[in-house]
């Protein structure tokens, strides 16, 4: 006795009371056009060098857990041999999620974010010749706001693998340990016919230390490598 209700038809009637489908389509097209223009502008800001070192954020809208001081960022870069440079040095494509987060922040704060910086391994950056990006926006007074993180996490052993390159003292200590290990596994009987004494072990250690140290220094100078404390904010590949 009662005809079934087609809810799609009812919804269309409700919509048509306020507007036409053609007008609605034009409004949607306008929204998408504005969205595309905003995103293109954001990409341009990300890939264009900027000397701006602060943004006029509404402090009440910021998440305190995402605010970091330059000293904390430097310590991270030194420990894991990462770089902290302007976003225009990033040679990969910025993910759409990062673009969306920037756009939402710009809408919420009523600003256009400038001077964006990124933390990443050197291989992900376009460096001038002499694994996980973190995108930051400067707040001012050496404080930065974390906008987005993407990519894979760093290898759990990266910090320890990069420890020898942290400072000159770390490198010397590493060479010292390697020399001891090489001396311990060296068949001393092949170098002497008599009883092996501590003096001969000491001489072998000094030889190993000189050989390992010389090799490391030669490779380091040949490739133009430097210590983590010197390159964390360097834009030069061999900085």
Image (cartoon, rainbow, N blue to C red):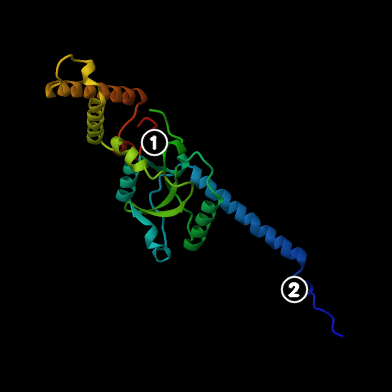
**Where does the image place residue 44, in percent across and percent down from the top left?**
53, 45
On screen, 176 above or below 97? Answer: above
Report helix, strand or loop for mark 2.
helix
Give the labeled residue for mark 2.
11
At x 41%, y 58%, the residue is 56
Q: In the displayed structure, does residue 230 sit left or right of residue 191?
A: right
**Where does the image place residue 122, in percent across and percent down from the top left?**
42, 37
Q: Quadrant of residue 217 in the image?
A: top left
Farthest residue to the right: give it.
1
Query: Can you tell which mark lies on residue 235?
Result: 1
On screen, 172 above or below 51? Answer: above
Farthest residue to the bottom: give it.
1
At x 77%, y 75%, the residue is 10
- Ranked by sequence position, the earlier of labels 1 and 2 is 2
Q: Quadrant of the C terminus?
A: top left
Q: CA distance from mark 1 to mark 2?
A: 57 Å
**Where does the image place residue 169, in percent across and percent down from the top left?**
22, 35
**Where does the image place residue 203, in percent across and percent down from the top left?**
16, 21
Judged by depth in the image, the label closer to the viewer, 1 or 2, is 2
Crowding around mark 1 (Cα neighbors within 10 Å: few <14, some 14 to 19, many 20+) is many
Crowding around mark 2 (Cα neighbors within 10 Å: few <14, some 14 to 19, many 20+) is few
Q: Quadrant of residue 228 in the image?
A: top left
Q: Quadrant of the N terminus?
A: bottom right
Query: Can you tell which mark lies on residue 201?
Result: none
Report helix, strand or loop for mark 1.
loop
């Amino acid at each position: 006795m009662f005809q079934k209700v087609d809810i799609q038809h009812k919804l269309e009637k409700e919509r048509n009371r306020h507007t036409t489908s053609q007008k609605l389509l034009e409004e949607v097209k306008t929204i998408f056009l504005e969205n595309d223009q905003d995103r293109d502008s954001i990409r341009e800001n990300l890939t264009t060098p900027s000397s701006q070192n602060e943004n006029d954020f509404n402090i009440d809208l910021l998440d305190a857990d995402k605010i970091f001081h330059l000293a904390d960022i430097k310590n991270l870069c030194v420990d894991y041999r990462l770089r902290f440079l302007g976003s225009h040095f990033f040679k990969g494509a910025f993910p759409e999620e990062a673009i969306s987060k920037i756009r939402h922040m710009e809408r919420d704060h009523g600003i256009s974010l400038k001077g964006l910086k990124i933390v990443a391994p050197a291989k992900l950056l376009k460096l001038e010749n002499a694994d996980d990006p973190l995108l930051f926006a400067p707040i001012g007074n050496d404080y930065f706001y974390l906008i987005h993180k993407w990519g894979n996490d760093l290898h759990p052993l990266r910090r320890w693998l990069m420890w020898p390159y942290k400072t000159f003292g770390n490198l010397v200590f590493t060479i010292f340990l390697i020399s001891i290990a090489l001396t311990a596994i060296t068949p001393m009987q092949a170098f002497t016919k008599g009883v092996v004494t501590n003096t001969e072990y000491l001489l072998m250690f000094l030889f190993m230390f000189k050989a390992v140290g010389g090799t490391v220094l030669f490779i380091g100078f040949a490739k133009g490598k430097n210590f983590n404390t010197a390159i964390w904010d360097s834009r030069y590949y061999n900085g």
